[in-house]
Amino acid sequence: MNEHVSIPAPANEAAHCPDSRPNTRKVFIKTYGCQMNVYDSTRMGDALAGEGYVTTEDMGEADLVLLNTCHIREKAAEKVYSALGRLRDMKKERAAEGREFMIGVAGCVAQAEGEEIIRRAPAVDVVIGPQTYHRLPDALKKARNGERVVDTEYAVEDKFEHLPATEKKVIRSRGVTSFLTVQEGCDKFCTFCVVPYTRGSEVSRPIGQIIDEAKRLVDAGVREITLLGQNVNAWASEDGKGNAIGLADLLYRLADVPGLARLRYTTSHPRDMDDRLINAHRDLRILMPYLHLPVQAGSDRILKAMNRRHTGAEYLALIERIRSARPDIAMSGDFIVGFPGETDQDFEDTLRMVEEVNYASAFSFKYSSRPGTPGADLPDHVAEEVKTERLERLQALLLKQQADFATSCVGKTIDLLLEKPGRMPGQVIGRSPWLQSVNVDAKTSQIGEIISVRIIGTGPNSLFAEPVESLIEV
Ligand code: 5AD
Ligand code: SF4
């Protein structure tokens, strides 16, 4: 998953209104890490809504602060501990005022550190893992009775079965695009990665549960759904007659949900891109022409040491097949520089791979040694300065490719999903099929519509467009 988001969970509508319910409590959820954590934060909000909590974007007015943490790179846990130091001080101030203030730690640091969090930060009331957050209300009740709760078991029950459905008005307040987790965990064991240890082995949500959630989202105004999974294209289930089905089948089923206009999925592993999934990109117009398919490195030696279980040539051949199925597809990826043993030549292979693929967007990181992963025990760790220098070179190339891709869009007429008000009055920000932000003159009442626009320019992080006459879909 991409680890580049750090936002508070969106506030639900009620948070902006004076308290209408008796005993309304407010929760501030700080989300670190990937899109899956963003989704989990919204579902934690759902779990707490049943207890009378509304979400707030203002930590100052919160009665409960939840840190939904990420453990993918080093210093993550340290960042959490320093945030907890500040929260401890807030808790003391609140106690002096006689007000409740509870602190919860959720997500992958909670899973990895468990009891240690309470030991190092005794002000914490609840530590809850990614598989047990449906039990948050119970944990908070216990904590109110003076217990310190650490709940990081892999729950035997399915948390999604136990979470209340998101309220319609809350879905509305979150906008016209939505994440939907369909798969969790990972069995790939890349040697640099903590995910198989923090999120456990691969589990797929049942198709019926996913379709129901998608319908509820669409019913509340969502037009675009991004299916999430640590390894989303490993999603697997059966069709009710005992036949195995995969992500492609799920996409075909979701394509029939009335009112749903766009589908995406992320993050995929190259080994799980099967022919049916590639054909879905050819057949389904609803499936947006954008694919995040991390390769991590270009050198076969490093790919082997990373346990990616494919070569650079195999990855390139796969991309060729995907591009011949869907020629307008934009590729995105993740890269790690400075994996143990990476030589200058290995790094040059990564640059060559990037040149060959020509990415529309990408995320790149310095290798970060994670205790407990096989990579941490490998010899020949790369010096920090070398990692820095390689990352700069790689990012310069990736940024250039991203800018070239944006420039290549100028003059094109595209479908734009109007998503949210723009910075200027009379402007709306939309989302292109290739996941770019596009500014266009439109009315905020049009949010949720897909309109036809012509791209007329590029900015640092977005494009500019003008509407073309025909409204292609409302
Ligand atoms: N060090 C650096 N980057 C990592 N990633 C995962 N683990 C590490 C690590 N130990 C990157 C990978 C992955 C993305 C989500 O984070 O590129 O695809
Ligand atoms: Fe981590 Fe590799 Fe699994 Fe992705 S596929 S979550 S990088 S172990």
Image (tube, helix red, strand yellow):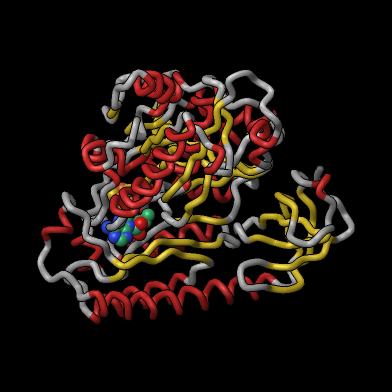
- Residue visible at 30% across and 26% down in the picture: 149
Taking depth in this image into account, of 99 and 325 the one nearest to the observer is: 99
User: Would you say residue 271 is visible in this rendering?
Assistant: no
User: Would you say residue 175 is visible in this rendering?
Assistant: yes
The extreme right residue here reads 469
Taking depth in this image into account, of 156 and 122 the one nearest to the observer is: 122
Dividing the picture into quadrants, the one containing residue 199 is: top left
Instruction: Identify whether 39 is placed above or below 394.
Output: above
The extreme front residue here reads 96
Dividing the picture into quadrants, the one containing residue 95 is: top left
Query: Residue 47's x, y, as percent?
Result: 49, 25
- Label tally: 0
Q: Is residue 151 left or right of 8 when viewed as pictured?
A: left
Q: Is residue 308 left or right of 21 when viewed as pictured?
A: left
- Residue visible at 67% across and 55% down in the picture: 431
- Residue visible at 40% across and 24% down in the picture: 140
Query: Residue 358's x, y, as percent?
Result: 48, 72
Q: Is residue 369 left or right of 124 when viewed as pictured?
A: left
Taking depth in this image into account, of 464 and 122 the one nearest to the observer is: 122
Query: Residue 83's x, y, as percent?
Result: 38, 49
Instruction: Identify whether 473 is placed above or below 131.
Output: below
Q: Split into 4 quadrants, where in the image is the C terminus?
A: top right
Q: Is residue 269 left or right of 324 when viewed as pictured?
A: left
- Residue visible at 50% across and 55% down in the picture: 291
Query: Residue 324's x, y, as percent?
Result: 53, 60
